[in-house]
Amino acid sequence: MWRLEVLLFLNSVSPVPHKMRGRTPRWLWVGAGSGALLALVALSAALAWTNIFDSALATQLALTPTSRSFRNWVAPTVPLFFDVYFFNWTNADRFPGEKPDLVQLGPYRFIEKRQHVNVTWFDNNGTVAYRTQRSWFFDEASSNGTLQDNITTLNAIAASAVYRSRFWGFLQQKGLSMGLAMFNQNIAVSKLAKELLFDGYEDPLLDLAKSLPSSTTGGAPPVDKFGWFYERNNSLDTDGYMEVSTGQLSGTIPGQILRWNYEDHLPFYEGECSKLSGSAGEFMARNLTEESILPMFVPDLCRTVNMEYVDSGDQSGLLFNKYALTERSFDNSTTSPSNTCFCNGECAWSGVMNVSACRFGSPAFLSLPHFLHGDAQLREFVTGMQPDPDAHSFYFAVEPKLGVPLDVAARFQLNIYMEPSEHVTLYQDVPRMLFPIFWVEQKVKMDESVIAELRFVRAIFDWGGTICACAALVFAALVTIATCWARKPHYIKKECVFEKPRDEAELKLNPI
C-alpha cells in the first residue's frame, strides 16, 4: 500500500529540470584570439611608433614626380619677400679726409616668385637636377622709398678695377690710373635705386673691359650695364645648376646638395672648405636637437655655412628650434681654424667672408648686416652701423622633429674691400677697409593653414604611441574577460523525463 502512495505522490509533482555541463561557445574563443592578436599588434606599434612614423614621414617627404612634396617644391606658393637696404654715402665729397657717414635707406621690397625648371630625374642614384627661375616684382606699397630715389655709394666698377690691378706691374697700374682719370671716374657714384638694382647703368669702363683679355677681367662675362642684380630677374643662372638628393634611398634626406654648376666640390677653395654639403634650402634634417648643427649651402655665399642652435620658441602652438649664423660662422682662423681655407689671402677681420674668388675676382666680402658678430674694427671705419641681433641675424626656425622651416630670415651684407694703391692716383690715400654697400633680407613665414596641418602631424607623432599602448591595454582587458568567461562552467537546462503514469487497474494487474 505504501508503494502506491509513493507513486501517486510522484505523479502529482511537476517534473524538475536539472543542469548538465555544456561546451564553451565557439565565438568566445574566436573573440579572445582576435583580441589577443589585436593587442599584440597595438603593443608592437606602440613600441615601434617612432620608427613607423619616421618611415611614413620619409615616404611623404621624398621627391618623386607624383609626390605632394614635389608639387610644393617645384612651384612654392608660400609668400616670399626680398628686401634691399642701401647705405647712402652722405659725405663722399670729403673722403678720405672724413670717414664715410652712411645712412640706411629702405627697405625696397620685392615680391619674389620662384619655380624649379629643367627638372631631370636620376633614379639610379636617387638625385634630381634643376635650375631655379626667380622673378622679382617691386612692391611700392610696402616699400620705404621708391625706385627713383637717388643714392650715393662707392663706385664698384672703379674699385674692382683697382683691386684686380694690385698685382700688376708699375706701367700697367699707371695705365689704369690714367684710364680712370680719362673716363672721369670718381670714388663715389650717384645713381637711381632702380639702376643700382635690376636696371643697371652704363659706364665707359665696361666698354673698355670688353676689349681686354679675360685674364685681366678675372673671366667675368662682358656686360653692357652694371647693376647689383642686373640680368638676374627671370634668369636661370641666378643659383646655377643644382643637383640634390630625392630622399628615396634609405637613410637619405631630400634636398641635400650633391653638385653645383656640374661640380661635386667648390673650386674656389681648397681642403675642407671645398666640400659641397648641406641643405639647398627647402628641406632640413629631421630629429634636430640643441646640439645639432644645421649645414646650409647658400649659392650667394658660394659655400656651405654651419648654423648653430641659439634659441627655442613657439609659433601658433608649434614648437621650433632656431638655428643661426653665429660669431664662428664667418670667423677667421683666430678662433675657428677650419675657416682658414676660406680666406683666399684677405682674412684680416673676423665676421666677414671673402667671396672674391666666386665673383670673378671682384673685391666682394660678405658679412651679416651692420657687421653683426664682426670684428669691432670694421664699424670704426664708418659711421652709421648699428648691429641688432633681432633685426640683422641670419636664421632658420625649424620644427625639430619634422625638419620643416617655419620662419626664415636670410640676411647678409655686401661690402667692397679697398686699400691704398701707390700707383693709382684715385686710390693713393684711401684707408684699408671694408665699405658697406647694401644688405638684403629674404624672409619666409609659413601661413596659418600650413601651421595647422603641421600641428596635426606633430600630434600624430606625439600621441600615436600612447594611443596604440592604450588600445593594447583595452584589447588585453577584453581578452582577459573573454578568457575568464570561457573558463566558467556552462550548463544547459534539461527536463526530467518520466514514464506515463499507470491507472489503478494497471497497478492491480501489475503490482510492484
Image (cartoon, helix red, strand yellow):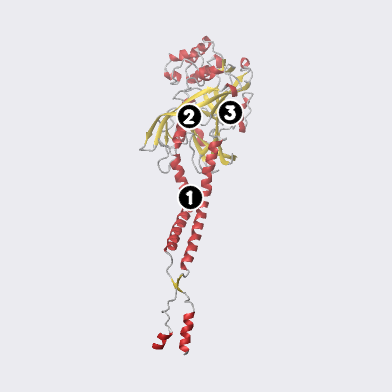
* Label pair 2/1, CB-CB below 8 angstroms: no
Q: CA distance from mark 1 to mark 3?
A: 44 Å
Give the residue type that dot 1 points to: Trp
Q: CA distance from mark 2 to mark 1?
A: 38 Å
Residue 370 as seen in the image, left or right of residue 284:
right
Residue matched to label 1: 49
Residue 123 as seen in the image, left or right of residue 491:
left
Residue 320, placed above or below residue 267: below
Q: Which image quadrant for residue 416?
A: top right
Give the residue type that dot 2 points to: Pro
Q: N-terminal of the two: label 1 or label 3?
A: 1
Q: N-terminal of the two: label 2 or label 1?
A: 1
Q: N-terminal of the two: label 3 or label 2?
A: 2
- Give the mark count: 3
Say which element carries label 3: helix
Give the residue type that dot 3 points to: Pro
**Disc 3 crowd, CA 10 A, few/some/many (<14, 14-19, 20+):** many
Residue matched to label 2: 299
Image position, residue 508 (x, y; %): 41, 88
